[in-house]
Structure formats: structure tokens, C-alpha cells
Amino acid sequence: MIALLMRDLRLAIRAGGGFGLGLAFFLIVVVLVPFGVGPEAGLLSKIAPGILWVAALLAALLSLDRIFALDFEDGSLALLATSPLPLEGVSLIKALAHWITTGLPLCFAAPVLGFLLHLPTDAYWFLVISLLIGTPGLSMIGTFGAALTVGLRRGGLLLSLLVLPLYVPTLIMGADAVRRGADGMAATTPLMLLGVITLGSIAVLPFATAAALRVNLR
């Protein structure tokens, strides 16, 4: 499992779908928002929690089609399916590699970009915590969606249509936690619900992902 994780990390970086792509997209979205809604600090501060979470969600969506596509094209996925490592474990490692190369960098970059949107100081901690809790769930859900569309031509659009509705609860809870933190309110409930979504995804979706891979590899 460690060897597979290291291999996926190297492939993600070499293929250009790793650290740089997600961060660049995250930065572009945050920079463009003031041009669209105006530079008023009060307005930007109010919408910053939602904008930051939407940007993080879309950045995580960019590289989902690469999770299984490269392995499917070169035949590695078929070898993994017949290896001693169960496909459920493969799914978990793929999701972990995606989170390390996409979600984790976003967690560290978000406070810096939050400054550009005049995010209140009290909300920075809640922003980082909510992203650390929520982005692993995004990666696991995205891995499931990638398994459903593996092998399909131009499956990127279909993948987005499948995954985005499943991302909505995480988006709502994450943005609400940051918003509550900015207003000085307790954010325990949305953070707990965010954790439930992530833990539920990690507990259930590896089995669904493995089943989808078995169907597509027949």
C-alpha cells in the first residue's frame, strides 16, 4: 500500500495534476472574485467563507479524472485488480494520494488567500479546520465518481455531473462552520456534521468504488 501511494504521488506530480494545478486554480478564483463583485471590504468579508469553500471544491474536482484514467490506459488497473491488495484498499490509497496532492495544499493556502477576501481574523482557524476535516471526504467521493466513469471517453463532464451533487452537503457544512467562526458563534455542530460526512464516506465508499471498478473491468 505504501508503494502504491508513493507511485501515485510521483505520477500526480509528473502528470501536472498535483500540487500546482489545484493551487493555481484556487488562486485564480479568489483573485477574480473582487473583480466580479467589487472591491468593497465589507461585501468580500461577508461572502469569503462561501467563496473559499467553493474554490477549494472546484480545485479538488480538477484532477479527479486522473485518479484511475492513467492506470486504466496503461493496463496497471487490471494488474491492481488481480493483485493481493483488495480493490477496497486500492480505492483508499487512491483517495489518500489525491488528498495529499490536492486537498492538503489547499488547507495551507486557504488562510493566505482568505486575506485577499478580507476574511475576519477569527475565522482563519475555522477555515483550516473545516478544510482539514472536509477535503478527505471530497477526495473519497471523487474517487468513487472516477471509478464510475473509468474507461469512458470524455468522462470528465459526466464525472463532474455525478460528483458535484454529492459535494453539496460538505460545501454547506464547511462554509457554515467558517461563517459561524467569522461571526463569533460556536461552530461545533457544522464541524461535527462535516466529520460525519467524511467518516461515512471513508467507511462506505471504498466498497462502492471497488464494486464499480470490478464492473468496468469486466
Image: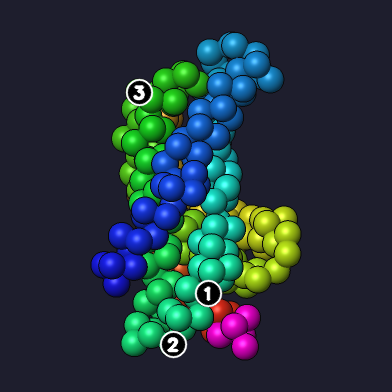
The residue sitting at 54% across, 57% down in the picture is 66
Mark 3, secondary structure of its residue: helix
- Residue on which disc 1 sits: 75
Q: Quadrant of the N terminus?
A: bottom left
Total marks placed: 3
Q: At which x and y percent is residue 127? A: 39, 37
Residue 82, which numbered label?
2
Distance from the alpha carbon under mark 3 to that under mark 1:
49 Å
The image shows residue 36, relative to residue 87, as above or below, that is above
Q: Earlier in the sequence, mark 1 or mark 2?
A: 1
What is the secondary structure assignment of the residue under circle 1? loop
Tell us which disc is closer to us: 2 or 3.
Answer: 2
Of mark 2 and mark 3, the one earlier in the sequence is: 2
Callout 1, which amino acid?
Gly
Of the residues shown, which amino acid type is indicated by label 2? Thr
Q: Is residue 79 above or below residue 193?
A: below
Left/right placement of residue 185 relative to residue 149 reads: left
**Kind of residue at disc 3:** Thr
Q: Is residue 159 left or right of residue 143?
A: right
Using the image, tell me which numbered label, if any, was put on residue 214: none
